[in-house]
Image (cartoon, rainbow, N blue to C red):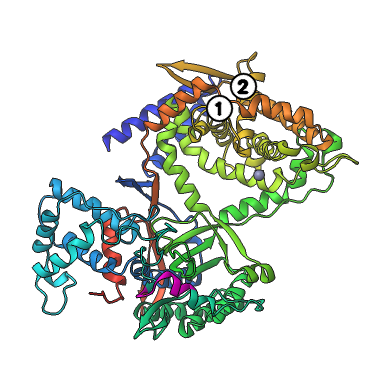
Amino acid sequence: MTNKLFIVTISAALLLGACKSNQSDLMSNEVSAKQDTIMKDSTEAFEYVSEQFADLRILRYEVPGFEQLSLQQKELLYYLSEAALCGRDIMWDQNYKYNLTIRKTIDAIVESYKGDVNNEDYKKFMVYAKRVWFSRGIHHHYGSEKFFPECTQEVFAQFIANADASKLPLNTGESVKDFSARLLPIIYDPKIAPKKVSLDASKDLITNSAVNFYEGVNQKEAIAFYEKMINKKDTTPVMIGLNSKLVKENGVLVEKVWKVGGMYTQAIEKIVYWLEKAITVAENPEQKLALEKLVKYYKSGSLKDFDDYNIAWVKDTQSAIDVTNGFIEVYEDPLGKKATFESVVSVRDFEASKRIATIGANAQWFEDNSTLLPQHKKKNVKGISAKVINAVMESGDAAPSTPIGINLPNNEWIRETHGSKSVNLGNIVEAYEKAAGGSVVNEFYYNDAIKKNVLDYAGLADKLHTDMHEVIGHASGQIEPGVGQPHETLKNYASALEEGRADLVALYYLMDQKLVDLGVMPSLDYGKASYDEYITKGLMVQLSRLKLGDNIEEAHMRNRQMIAKWAFEKGQKENVIEKKVENGKTYFVINDYLKLRVLFGELLKELQRIKSQGDYKAGKALIENYGVKVDLALHKEVLERYNKLAMAPYQGFIQPKLTPVMKDGKIVDVTIEYPKSFTQQMLEYSKNYSYLPVIN
Ligand code: ZN
């Protein structure tokens, strides 16, 4: 606590020092008052990173605007979240048939442990426990190989022996010792189930994969079984085999369908229970219909019903709240037929939608006031619409590791005939950025004042940048009569130039009072932070993604370096951006934000001219001279500095917790909390949502 305040005080002092010196006393007072609120904000700042172990990092995410939702919407989110969590154990069982037995054993050990938590063996055991929770089983969630505890088998056996036996998943009459002897080889023997999904085509893919989608069946039999079901003339085919386990019973192949009354019925009945509650508070008839069809599908197990549901879901475009819940992705099946359970509950990002609408409504003002040559300005510009949603709850295959966007349904004919939904999970993307941000900002930005500005302001500034890039950036400007489309005239440089043009529209307006007047940006400090970020990322940080010696290929990376490097060079005479080297570390420091804005405006005018006139030669020169080549010494330095930050390669999230507030048996409110402990959440979920029996 003391430590934190100390750091904040220092940066606040530096901030004041960095302010312009010609301000009146009144202004200084205003500034100090503002510092106080900043100090308060940063003490209470949301912590995006929870912990790191093995190759994993646990993050947290926020749901902005939750409190402003109506009671009906909150209730709907609560029911859908419960439905999501009730399916959680299905994914564990799908990954490997002994996963639930192992997890219940781990849970029992952790809950019974009374010893020293800093005991080396216990710490090793806990790393294994958390890895299993993260991967929803004993195989790596991404690499699919089995991983092992670092404590010995004897130590693990002792932990089992010390655990509360009533919590262990023992067989009837089985002793703890026998149970241990049965279980430990599954955990420790590298020859048992070494791979979750085998992709070694020289061996039988099914019998060499640990996934629990087939039993007593080999690859040839399974392929033959499904071959027969394919009707090539069917123009609206279902996704055959999607929601069942294929087993051989008395020599005959049968599908155990995942549905009410079928396999996983204990969990699916609960999912249906909560979905039926959700139906009662649906936002509109389209959403209600989609949820009803989802329930119908869970009850029938018919893949035709699943298609009907997906069609209804695609048509529900007006709802603020959305959900995917079902057997959706087929990556874990070596034959690519059977889907894992997942659920993502989301709500539209109202703040983002409002921002986007405000910017879009003023698109003509932005066009008229830009630096473009008069003949290149659009007389009638229309903003492009964009949709951002925020995750509220994720489960199954979508948690703790998560997608950052949703693009469904997967069935191709439905996509072609009825369309699909494609959205970004805004709060997840933001959490990733913020989580990476702290240490990166600390390492690559020049002083505490700049670091603090970037940490405090760049979040919203980034969003505004993205909004303007999409809504008014790509939409702006016009091509001169008779000049062809950019992909014809500017060829391979067209996309880097176009991304640069859209970025420059955003950058130019981020330092414009208009955004403050429109109420979408509190002050120009946000614009300044975004300039610091753009220059430092464009000239240094983004190089961390490249191997030493490589040139830049990717269009967005090219345009960022091109803009930053061009502005650095053009502003050199007036020292607009200064290159400083201190203690062997390079920094790019902006000395004059307003002059930098003028430079951005000039480059915007030039990029628009290149596009409007199809000037290939000039476009090529800009990209090749500024966007492609990398300063080798600087690149080496960036890689060394970045690698020292030691960020784990895989990340996942703790989920928010929704709790209904009850009065007279009715929900009168739903609260949201953001738990901090991954271990706690995993134990809580196991306790509250374990509906599937263990297989022994
Ligand atoms: Zn773009």
Cα distance, mark 1 to mark 2? 9 Å
For the residue marked with disc 2, what is the amino acid? Phe
Instruction: Tell me whether the residue at label 1 lies in contact with that at label 2, contact meaning CB atoms closer than 8 angstroms.
Output: yes
Horizontal arrangement in the rendering, residue 222 relative to residue 594 (left or right): left
Horizontal arrangement in the rendering, residue 673 relative to residue 75 (left or right): left
Where residue 259 sits in the image (x, y, percent)? Answer: 43, 81
For the residue marked with disc 1, what is the amino acid? Leu
Q: Secondary structure at mark 1?
A: helix
Residue at image x 37%, y 71%? 90
Where residue 14 sits in the image (x, y, percent)? Answer: 43, 24
> Considering the image in quadrants, where does the N terminus appear?
top left
Residue at image x 68%, y 68%? 416
Residue at image x 67%, y 51%? 358
Residue at image x 56%, y 35%? 530
* Disc 1 residue crowd, few under 14, some 14–19, many 20+, Cα 10 Å: many
Outermost residue on the front side: it is 202
* Magenta residue check for 86: no
Whether residue 518 is visible, yes or no, is no
> Considering the image in quadrants, where does the C terminus appear?
bottom left
Whether residue 145 is visible, yes or no, is yes
User: Looking at the rendering, which quadrant does residue 209 occupy?
Assistant: bottom left
Nearer to me, 673 or 538: 538
Q: Which residues are magenta?
A: 215-223
| Rendered image: mark on residue 568 | 2
The residue at which mark 1 appears reads as 539
